[in-house]
Image (cartoon, rainbow, N blue to C red):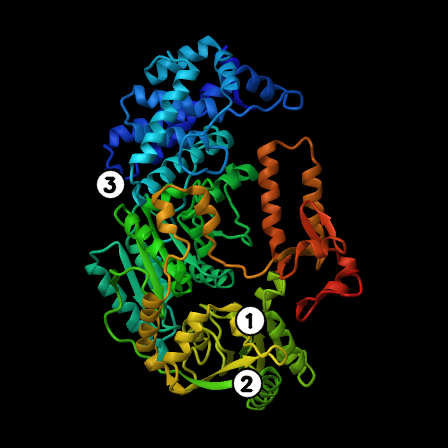
Amino acid sequence: MLDGLKSHPDRLLVDHLIGTSKRAQEKAQRIDWQTFGIEKGRALKLVHLCCLSHDFAKASRDFQDYINAPSQGVHVSHAPLSALVTYHVLRKNGFDVKHSAFGYFIVRHHHGEFSDFGFIQENREKIERQFFSIPSDFKKWFENSVSISLDFSIESLLNEIEKQIDSLCFFTDFSFKDYLLLQTLSSILISSDREDAALKDLTITISKKLTIEMLEKYISQLPSGGLINEMRKKFNDHIKQNLRHVDSNILSITAPTGIGKTLANLRVALSMTDENTLIVYALPFINIIDQTLDTIYRVLSGVEFDSTTVLPYHHLADPSYEDPLYEQQSIQNILIEGWHSQIVVTTFVSLFESLFTNKKVPFFHKLLNSVIVLDEVQSIPHKYWKPLAELFEEMAKFNCKIVLSTATQPMIVEKTKELVTDKFELNRTKLHFHREISFSDFKRVAEEEAKKSLDKNEKLLIVLNTIRESKEVYEALRTSISKEKLCYLSSNVIPKHRFERTRRIKQTKSAMVCVSTQVVEAGVDVSFDKVIRDEAPFDSILQVAGRCNRNYTSSLGDVHVYKVIEDERKRSFSSYIYDTLLLDITREILNQGQIEERNFPDLSKKYFTNIKKRANIDKENLSQLVKSLSFEKIGSSFHLIDKKYSTASLFIEYDKRAMKLREELNQTLKDSKMEKFEKIARVAKLLRQMAMYTIEVPILREKLEGALIVENGLLVVPHDNLRYWYNDEIGFQRSEEVMMF
């Protein structure tokens, strides 16, 4: 009978349980269990027993009927009974109530999101029927494998577990360490479970081809001469020297924009890795990920590599794999979602919403053996500083190193090892703060400055706070300036066009005017002769100032900041986007009128000190939610990007490539013969590719459903209707002509 029991259509149940355990054991070997307060041998046994038990109930008659004839059988959840058995097995093997309860909890949720930690009421009669339908030979095999007898009644076991877990929750003060332990155990189980189902006995090989020697070679070939290049060389040597005296797992790199922090971050990461270390390079915005990837690819120049060396991980990424063993989409999906790579380049959203979550995170266990680089760390909202600091400090007790890199260091973690101990002073820009100005007058100022810049053959950047504001300024300039001399950037434009336009800005040496929202701010390696910006918090102002005279090609570039007021409502545009307290603090510290770059560090310190004193740095009470293992509340409370209004996702069928992707998605979803995991992976890949043509627009989805095609959960602007909905220059435009409301 054992040979007939299946866990998946093409995998025997016993083989799956053993295979899952084997993969999990390999992962568990790399974890520092002593820091969790568990002896390593006991931790390995805990993981082993959870893996052997996690699909116990798949041996039941109902599940086997379903797996052998999915179209006829009724799917019955196997997690409840398997979780009860896990708890029994762990207790009988000498594990305490807490660790047994953790085992119960991760098995109970290995096919769904975490609930708040605790006992879950079940349909007792259904579980009892399931238990009694388990074949005797499977029970015997299982009892021999876990070294205990299944000598219990379901009713008494349920009562015992409920009583003990309720008591545990009432009397125990959980901690960040408990949160990490639960997430780590869950990650090891679900990643091993998925890998065995998709890969069977295939071994994943990571290509660790990025080395410190390659980085040294690349840096040695960079241009020399000139003030900025000499400063970059000095900065690189300084970081290299200070890495010899590292005595902390939380490091900081605080230095001016454009001085070479990306290369410094890579040096630090590569200097602190071993064969089991994952490098995670996280940035706040997708538009600067490509820039960082381009730097890494140049370092790897001349070496053949794929996404097992460098994995871009965000919704616009389309990773590639060269090994024929990985050609199946289902296998590639495992590699991507499990972060099977030497270095993962991702967004703050992807990283932090995997740290504070009630979802399953297959790579979570890897983070305890990682170097996490947080580039442009000032972008983290202050309302999450406290919980992030606590989590970083707890993770640093393991083999996790965290690097906080920025030109304007916020005070997230109190004690860090600063790697920049010399003063690297650049004085490339001067900030000019102007009084309030009406939007009508501001548009006239923008037109005048644009004409001046073009006459002088200079590049001008104008940064606005809202899409409406940016579109109106662009359209005002468009009346007197040809589109060849203009560029528009905002989230209103499909990502494909944003990337193309950013490349154009970087490559253009002649005069031009770029009108943009905040998408151009942090980290984008572009340089303008002059910048005009609508009012913003101080850190955002400094970031956009970093786009002015970035390469020190002139003595002092000018950045003009205005408080732009709506003509009708008499309200500042900045108030729609930014926290009032941040704007108030900015106004208080920037009352001198003019400030040069050499004064930025002192003012930055003053700004962040004020935030820490006056702002709520745990606004969502996340620290307490973590300590109480309130996973559902964590999942609903932590949103790195705080949307102030409802949005709808639109797929813009802009060109033949977009039309082909839409057609392929429809064909894949209709293909009834495609294997389940292959279809899931294929759909995921197509959606990633379609994201290059997808935008979020500030409008209720319901208002568009009557005017646009709703297809596979997507709102689609078909190619034939582009003229009504999408403008080549400014992107999405709401067409009153085809909307009947």
Mark 1 crowdedness (10 Å alpha carbons): few <14, some 14-19, many ≥20: many
Secondary structure state at the residue bearing disc 3: helix
Q: Is residue 164 left or right of residue 648?
A: left
Height in image: 466 above or below 197? below
Secondary structure state at the residue bearing disc 1: loop
Q: Position of residue 1 (x, y in %)?
A: 50, 10
Mark 2 crowdedness (10 Å alpha carbons): few <14, some 14-19, many ≥20: some
Which image quadrant for residue 701?
bottom right
Specify whether residue 212 is in view: no
- Sequence order check, earlier mark of 2 and 3: 3
Which image quadrant for residue 699?
bottom right
Q: CA distance from mark 2 to mark 1?
A: 18 Å
The three-letter amino acid code for the residue at tag 3 is Thr
Residue 437, numbered circle: 2
Q: Position of residue 679 (x, y in %)?
A: 62, 37
Height in image: 601 above or below 129? below
Q: CA distance from mark 2 to mark 3?
A: 57 Å
Q: Residue at x 63, y 23 (%)?
A: 70
- Sequence order check, earlier mark of 3 and 1: 3
Q: CA distance from mark 3 to mark 1?
A: 45 Å
Q: Position of residue 610 (x, y in %)?
A: 33, 71
Q: Is residue 47 left or right of residue 557?
A: left
Q: Is residue 336 left or right of residue 395?
A: right
The three-letter amino acid code for the residue at tag 1 is Thr
Secondary structure state at the residue bearing disc 2: strand
Q: Position of residue 66 (x, y in %)?
A: 60, 21
Which image quadrant for residue 65?
top right
State the residue position of label 3.
Answer: 35
State the residue position of label 1.
Answer: 517
Height in image: 93 above or below 669? above
Closer mark to the observer between disc 2 and disc 3: 2
